[in-house]
């Protein structure tokens, strides 16, 4: 069975060096805690992120993983000034396209862009798809504490919809306005803050009504839906209350938007009860498999999906069929 892993992190030395430089500045941000350890050349995570020709492929072969959908690792380019962010996004897309060209049956890729400058972001998005033939886009959630419901970012959404390419909203640490409660006990990354941050981002988009303006926009979120599927009934119920109070501008219930415009991946969540629940609530056609390599290891993610107690038809969709459709990957 073909296995396409859809949230597989990647970087390159110039990007890692630029992030590491921020850790040595006076820029205090939760996003810089991890790179102080992982951004050092030669560290295991650095090696895993920057390798596309060696160990990554050997691991994929050993675990019968057909393809990695590569995306620039969090926090991407969103901590830089606009000019630097645009330069690094352009270089990232060129490097990613080159890696795909070297291993065109093993890699697909999501293009980076700099939301700090929406006009230049749109140009780079168009180049990423039309010239470099990448498969979609990666956004590492908030940009300077702002989310995609802000109208200044709507040209980015308009472009993604027109190109028929999904935006994968990947977590990063909470913004400064949200950060304080997450700074202790290791809560600032995937232990808790990542899913909290992306779920806030997604719900702001859903409740703002922007999907009525962009009805064909495709958004992908990882980690079995960043907790949203488990709260969708209550979201609908409370939405009705707030709609009566005039607090929400949208006309569609959260579940209607989520089931129409969102897809989720299993990245980092190898838990069959959660998978079965999401199949029941969303449908197997809204779920894609992922490993979250190199932040999580490959063998258990493969073994889990191989043996999960779901139908073979659903397994085919989740392992590769949905990714082929959503990310325009040739069967």
Image: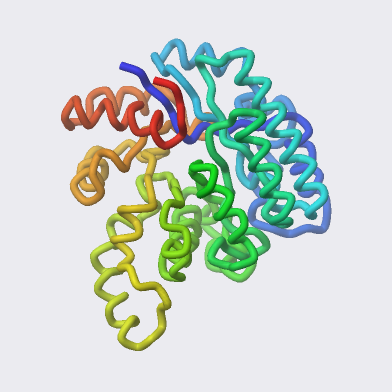
Q: Is residue 141 visible?
A: yes
Q: Is residue 183 visible?
A: no
Measured as percent of width and height from the top left, residue 20 is found at 76, 42
Measured as percent of width and height from the top left, residue 281 is found at 21, 51
Residue occupying the point 69% across, 49% down: 121
Instruction: Give the position of the N terminus as an image quadrant.
Output: top left
Judge from the rendering whether residue 197 lies leftward or rightward of residue 142; answer left or right: left
Residue at the limit of the structure toward the front, as seen here: 162
Measured as percent of width and height from the top left, residue 125 is found at 64, 42
Instruction: Give the position of the C terminus as an image quadrant.
Output: top left
Residue occupying the point 39% across, 73% down: 250
Judge from the rendering whether residue 242 lies leftward or rightward of residue 32; answer left or right: left
Residue at the limit of the structure toward the bottom, as seen here: 245
Q: How many marks?
A: 0
Measured as percent of width and height from the top left, residue 272 is found at 24, 38
Colour scheme: rainbow
Front in this rendered view, residue 35 or 1: 1
Residue occupying the point 62% across, 33% down: 130
Relative to 27, is 49 above or below? above
Relative to 237, is 56 above or below? above
Residue occupying the point 25% across, 49% down: 282
């Amino acid at each position: 069975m073909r296995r396409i892993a859809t949230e597989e992190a990647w970087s390159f030395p110039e990007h890692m060096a630029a992030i590491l430089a921020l850790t040595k500045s006076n820029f205090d941000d939760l996003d810089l805690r991890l790179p102080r350890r992982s951004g050092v050349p030669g560290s295991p995570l650095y090696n895993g992120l920057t390798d596309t020709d060696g160990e990554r492929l050997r691991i994929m072969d050993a675990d019968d993983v057909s393809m990695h959908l590569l995306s620039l690792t969090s926090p991407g380019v969103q901590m830089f000034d606009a000019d630097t962010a645009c330069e690094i996004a352009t270089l990232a897309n060129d490097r990613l396209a080159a890696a795909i060209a070297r291993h065109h049956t093993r890699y697909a890729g999501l293009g980076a862009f700099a939301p700090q400058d929406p006009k230049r972001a749109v140009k780079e998005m168009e180049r990423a798809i039309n010239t470099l033939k990448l498969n979609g886009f990666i956004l590492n959630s908030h940009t300077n504490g702002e989310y995609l419901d802000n109208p200044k970012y709507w040209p980015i959404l308009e472009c993604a919809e027109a190109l028929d390419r999904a935006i994968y909203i990947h977590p990063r640490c909470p913004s400064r306005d949200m950060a304080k409660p997450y700074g202790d006990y290791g809560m600032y990354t995937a232990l808790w803050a990542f899913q909290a941050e992306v779920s806030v981002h997604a719900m702001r988009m859903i409740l703002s009504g922007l999907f009525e303006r962009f009805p064909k926009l495709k958004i992908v979120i990882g980690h079995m839906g960043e907790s949203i599927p488990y709260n969708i009934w209550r979201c609908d119920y409370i939405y009705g209350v707030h709609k009566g109070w005039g607090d929400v501008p949208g006309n569609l219930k959260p579940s209607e938007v989520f089931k129409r415009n969102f897809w989720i991946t299993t990245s980092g969540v190898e838990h069959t009860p959660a998978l079965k629940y999401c199949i029941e609530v969303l449908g197997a056609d809204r779920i894609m498999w992922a490993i979250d390599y190199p932040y999580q290891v490959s063998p258990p993610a493969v073994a889990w999906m191989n043996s999960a107690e779901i139908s073979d038809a659903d397994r085919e969709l989740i392992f590769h069929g949905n990714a082929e459709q959503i990310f325009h990957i040739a069967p």
